[in-house]
Image (tube, rainbow, N blue to C red):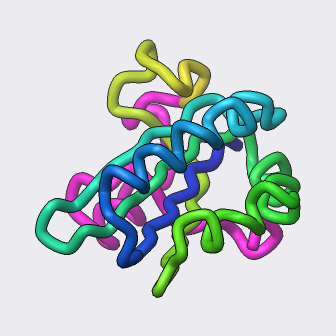
Amino acid sequence: MAAVFFVCVTSDVDPKDVERRWLERLPRFKAVPGLMQKMYGYDEATGDVCRTYFFENGEVLAAHRGSELAKTIAGAYDAVDVRVEKYSVLCSLWPDRGPFTDVAPPDAWPSEEVCRRSAPGARLTPLREEFR
């Protein structure tokens, strides 16, 4: 099952320096096995930066989290605080669009009512225990 991983970093580093740092690290992330996509975000109100990773599956995500590269994220941005969230991808609103084109559409997911109870319109659920 495909996996999504969010990393939000609070840092006192100037945003231009943060950008320089992630550009320097970009080639290393392009080489991560099973990493299908990585998106970068910035919250102008707080200065927090976030990364959204899309992995082929939870096992690949777990391997990445144990890697030397993943262990350097907080230090690379002089993090004051790091927040992470992990999810298994259950279905996709538009399954023909990337990064996951092999995920079932919402109407094919047998337990969508669980998703609706947790958050109206949600399409993700927390990773099962074996992926934590």
Span highlighted in magenta in the image: 104-132
Tell me the residue at 56%/59% (across/down).
Answer: 87
Q: Is residue 108 magenta?
A: yes
Dividing the picture into quadrants, the one containing residue 9 is: bottom left
Q: Which residue does the image show at 48% across and 20% down from the upper left?
A: 98
Q: Position of residue 115 (x, y in %)?
A: 38, 61
Q: Position of residue 40 (x, y in %)?
A: 41, 44
Picture layout, residue 16 above or below residue 43: above
Residue with the most extreme top position: 96
Q: Is residue 53 left or right of residue 64?
A: left
Residue at x 48% of width, y 55% of height: 111
Residue 102: which quarter of the image? top right
Between 116 and 94, the one lying in front of the other is 94
Q: Quadrant of the C terminus?
A: bottom right
- Looking at the image, residue 2 lies above or below residue 16: above
Q: Is residue 113 visible?
A: yes
Count of number-bearing discs: 0
Q: Position of residue 116 (x, y in %)?
A: 29, 61
Q: Residue at 52% of width from left, 25% of height from top?
A: 99
Judged from this view, the residue extending furthest toward the bottom is 80
| Residue located farthest toward the left when viewing the structure as drawn | 45
Q: Is residue 94 above or below residue 50?
A: above
**Which quadrant is home to the N terminus?**
top right
131, 90: nearer the viewer: 131
Residue 69 magenta-highlighted: no
